[in-house]
Amino acid sequence: MTNIRIGIIGGSGLYQMPELENVEEVRLDTPFGSPSDAFITGTLEGERVAFLPRHGRGHRLTPSELPFRANIYGFKMLGVERILSASAVGSLQEQYAPLDMVIPDQFFDRTRARSQESTFFGDGIVAHVTFAHPVCAEVGDALEAACKTTDVNVHRGGTYLCMEGPAFSTKAESNVYRSWGMDIIGMTNLQEAKLAREAEMCYATLALVTDYDCWHEGHDAVSVEAVVEYLNKNVRNAQLIMRDAVRRLKTAERECKCGSALKNALFTAPDLWTPATTKRLEAIIKRYMPDAIG
């Protein structure tokens, strides 16, 4: 399993990758509990990849129930270096129309109940990773290039506002977010991006626009029926884009800084690391452990 370098997280409506060959299910127990579902491993464009349905097959988990740490740690246990994340979003600006795709380069946190799921660290080991640029540009480049081979309207850049959910926004909230200059709104990707950075993995989002949230006077307020309709239309495109992005990334060298995010981020001296926490974080901090340093 350690030769799996690319991971894919499927969001609402994207529960499988039909092009995967030599498929196996891998169930993992992580130090942070069980992931959302079994990892589906297989070959895509000649590359071994691991696919995870974010909400579980059948969409069983709300955004606030997601085991973010277990999901990202599970990818790390499999040897993954780069994560491609697909996610349904609402649009907060006129130029992002339903069925468009956005590759955001910034996140803004409006969650309230996820502090425990937003970091691997604590309990004796403190780390403060740099997060000014939360998205890996190299993975974003691959997604953008892949979008251009598919019949979709793609936008590069913009800010993804991550809300708590599971209810959609009020109209007042939606208008405030617009006034702040936010571009799209979703419920899941910020925690994934933070944890991927702590785990020294590259991360980028392919955001599938399903609606205009509830601010747009010319459109009805967002409904589950509308979201599902646009998701179904865009899922196949998302699958094709992910496949092409994997093709591009499988031979691309990692020249970004994501793979060394912890190098200057670990504030606690190794001789003070608590044994239990050191063991729990082994997959992430192994090369910074005293024996490895020495």
Image: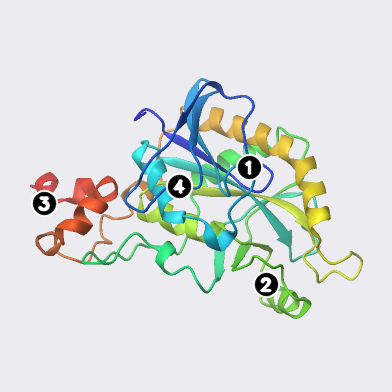
Q: Is residue 265 left or right of residue 55?
A: left
Q: Nearer the viewer, residue 41 or 159?
A: 41
* Separation of marks 3 and 4 at Cα, in angstroms: 29 Å
Q: Nearer the viewer, mark 3 or mark 4?
A: 4
Q: Nearer the viewer, mark 2 or mark 3?
A: 3
Could you tell me if the residues under marks 4 and 2 are in contact, i.e. CB atoms within 8 Å? no
Instruction: Answer few, some or many: residues within 10 Å of disc 1's Cα (few below 14, many 20 plus, some between 14 and 19).
Output: many
Q: Is residue 279 left or right of residue 217?
A: left
- The image shows residue 73 at horizontal and vertical percentages of 38, 48
Q: Which residue is mark 3?
A: 290
Q: Which residue is mark 2?
A: 181
Q: Secondary structure at mark 3?
A: helix
Q: Nearer the viewer, mark 4 or mark 2?
A: 4
Q: Which residue is mark 4?
A: 35
- The image shows residue 250 at horizontal and vertical percentages of 48, 28
What residue type is disc 2 on? Gly
Give whichever of discs 2 and 3 has the lower sequence position: 2
**Can I make out residue 255 in this image?**
no
* Separation of marks 1 and 3 at Cα, in angstroms: 40 Å
Q: Nearer the viewer, residue 212 or 111?
A: 111
What residue type is disc 1 on? Glu
Q: Secondary structure at mark 1?
A: helix
**Can I make out residue 236 in this image?**
yes
Give whichever of discs 4 and 1 has the lower sequence position: 4
- The image shows residue 199 at horizontal and vertical percentages of 35, 51
What residue type is disc 4 on? Pro
Instruction: Answer few, some or many: residues within 10 Å of disc 3's Cα (few below 14, many 20 plus, some between 14 and 19).
Output: few
* Separation of marks 2 and 3 at Cα, in angstroms: 45 Å
Question: In what quadrant of the picture does the N terminus appear?
Answer: top left
Residue 164, by quadrant, is: bottom right
Q: Nearer the viewer, mark 4 or mark 1?
A: 4
